[in-house]
Image (spheres, helix red, strand yellow):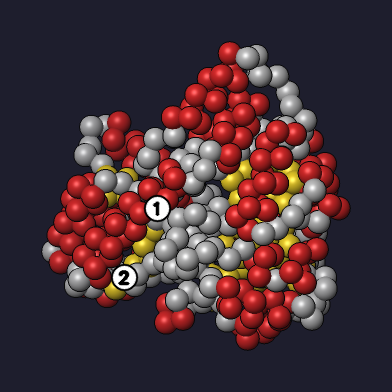
Amino acid sequence: MTIPRASRVERLKPSATVGITTRAMALEADGRDIIRLSVGEPDFDTPEHVKRAAIAAIEAGQTRYTALDGTRELKAAIQRKFEQENGLEYALDQIVVSCGAKQACFNLCLALLEEGDEAVVPAPYWVSYPEMVRMTDADPVFVHCRAETGFLMRPEQLAASITPATRLLILNSPSNPTGAVYPGDALKALGEVLAEYPRIVVLSDEIYEHIQWAVPEYPSFAEVNPGLYDRTVTVNGVSKAFAMTGFRVGYAAGPTELIRAMAKIQSQSTTNACSISQAASVAALDGGLSFVRKMCAEFRRRHDAVQPRLDAISGISCAPGDGAFYLFANVREALEHKGIKDDVGFCEALLEETGVALVPGTAFGAPGYVRISFAASLQTLEEAIQRIETFVIS
């Protein structure tokens, strides 16, 4: 018997990053030598003081429900983080803790958007943004950003995309998948456009904040655009900066009415984030940035070693990135040389023939590209590049 499913499910696309990683893991289980450069998480171990805090929380009996929007201790640590690192002041009721930054983004979409609304999504985009918007019955409006402009949305592009139905702009800097970082003046120029449209809220996804080498001091959107503070929701988390992806703790800060709405939605879904993970997150946020800086330096070292090697492969063009731990490579010439239809076919063939798992650019709104994660050792990356080159030129 076929059970009818809700129409919203049929409209959704499955996550390409999860799909390719699942296929790679299946091949691994079959004994294949697989190099997974498709996964979006640091390959570093969680800092020792963070792990100790989690263990101490268990031993202290912190294993029960917490306030649905986060423990007071964690919200206070987040409050300090924003003030010290971003120059932003938030009251505790302007902060909500969620089961990862992904849930925070989704909760905001549910709290703000409805049928007939539009959300501006610069492309290339993280795979989940359009689907989150569609889940609310609103429509994503894509602004295609070119490699020639560093994959950054220009103010005139933003202005041209706005209609009376626009309610949300989703920004991600540093970017997944391109590694692009918006400098402060670029964010300010976008803010000047938005100043004329008071109905538009900004979702500033800053999850890769500390993994960037483009500017000395990271510019948070709300910090650069104080006039838009009251309609900016800043999303962040501990997953990327502190190698805590499995802890599943993200957070958002913004206008009280929106944060309360997001918490209300969360109260009927996951309720609170894991109590143990929240205790560990306090230790992460209050423990300084020495671990983060060392990890970022290593990511830059890998980027600087891998990017020229990829760009030198005949049929592949790969511009440098400024942050995160991804490279976004143009493989259109390689597709033509190999007689492969598209980037999806390229990634499928590369995985089957060489065991290297990448993510097709189509998933990010950029056909003809592939995303390469360099969250792996240099030795592993060098082997992967050799396999990619052999595959492309054969």
Left or right of 190 on screen, residue 260 = right
Q: CA distance from mark 1 to mark 2?
A: 20 Å
Tell me if mark 2 has few (under 14), some (14-19) or many (20+) residues whose alpha carbon lies within 10 angstroms of its own.
many
Q: Quadrant of residue 2?
A: top right
Q: Secondary structure at mark 2?
A: strand
Is residue 13 in sight in this rendering?
no
Residue ranking furthest to the right:
257
Task: Measuring from the top left, give residue 10's x and y in whole percent.
Answer: 63, 51
Task: Measuring from the top left, give residue 322's x and y in whole percent.
Answer: 42, 66
Q: Secondary structure at mark 1?
A: helix
Q: Which residue is mark 1?
A: 296
Task: Measuring from the top left, give residue 309's x and y in whole percent.
Answer: 21, 65
**Amino acid carrying mark 2 in the image:** Cys
**Amino acid carrying mark 1 in the image:** Cys
For residue 258, the mark is: none
Q: Which residue is mark 2?
A: 318
Residue at (49%, 37%) from the top-left corner? 244
The numbered mark, 1 or 2, whose residue comes first in the sequence reads 1
Residue at (75%, 34%) from the top-left corner? 72
Is residue 263 in sight in this rendering?
yes
Along the line of sight, which residue is nearer the eye, 261 or 211?
211
Q: Quadrant of residue 238?
A: top right
Q: Quadrant of the C terminus?
A: bottom left
Left or right of 88 on screen, residue 242 = left
Left or right of 63 on screen, residue 47 = left
Q: Quadrant of the N terminus?
A: top right
Tell me if mark 1 has few (under 14), some (14-19) or many (20+) residues whose alpha carbon lies within 10 angstroms of its own.
many
Up the image or down, 325 lies above or below 21; here it is: below
Along the line of sight, which residue is nearer the eye, 324 or 178?
324
Left or right of 30 on screen, residue 92 = right
Task: Measuring from the top left, give residue 388's x and y in whole percent.
Answer: 21, 58
